[in-house]
Image: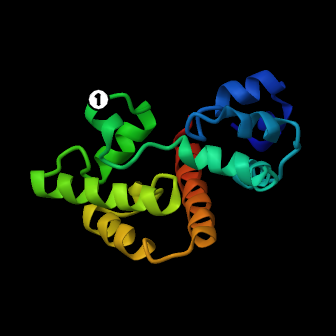
Amino acid sequence: MTLDEVNALSPAAFVARYGALFEHSPWVVERAATMRPFTDVHAGLMAALDAASLDEKLALIRAHPELAGKAAMDRTLTDASAAEQASAGLDRLTPAEFERFYALNAAYRDRFDFPFIICVRLTDKAGILAAMEQRLDHDRDTEIATALNQIGEIVRLRLEDLP
């Protein structure tokens, strides 16, 4: 779809096309629809997120599933999240790897009160585990910024995957 076609979409058509890019958070795309015309779709979507309140940003972060967590075990991940986690091998963990993810997810959530977010398509299991361990040493503001940056990468790749 060309940029002119994107900018010409009705608000409802824009949300229908892009609403699933942000995990369980179509509100970001709804706001972005009112900010057009865009010169870059990804930048426009991220500008809508940047303009959100801290509480809204935290709600978006919290809308993401834990990596190799309960939603993965229950098979209740969105199709996009399931494919992304599988691309990093998180659907094929050994019992020891699962226990490590479980412990790190719990420690991270206890420290920051939101799930660990990383663009899994840009790394692998070892890289994810290393990032989880390293980022536990960050302060909360740094982790909020890092999570939002990672969400931006997730959205960028999901956007590239659209027909």
Camera-side residue of 94 and 89 = 94
Rendering quarter of residue 105: bottom left
Which residue is depicted at the point 60% across and 41% down? 22
Residue 81 in the image: state x and y as whole percent: 42, 40
Residue 121 in the image: state x and y as whole percent: 40, 55
- Which quarter shows the N terminus? top right
Please say if 43 is above or below 59: below
Say how the picture is coloured.
rainbow
Which residue is depicted at the point 24% across and 51% down? 89
Rendering quarter of residue 88: bottom left
Q: Which amino acid is tagged 1?
A: Asp
Crowding around mark 1 (Cα neighbors within 10 Å: few <14, some 14 to 19, many 20+) is few
Residue 36 in the image: state x and y as whole percent: 87, 42
Q: Seen from this angle, which residue lies furthest front?
A: 110
Residue 119 appears anywhere in the view: no
Which residue is depicted at the point 56% across and 74% down? 139
Residue linked to disc 1 = 74
Camera-side residue of 11 and 27 = 27
Q: In this view, does 136 lie to the left or right of 2?
A: left
Residue 134 in the image: state x and y as whole percent: 39, 76
- Which quarter shows the C terminus? top right
Element type at marker 1?
A: helix
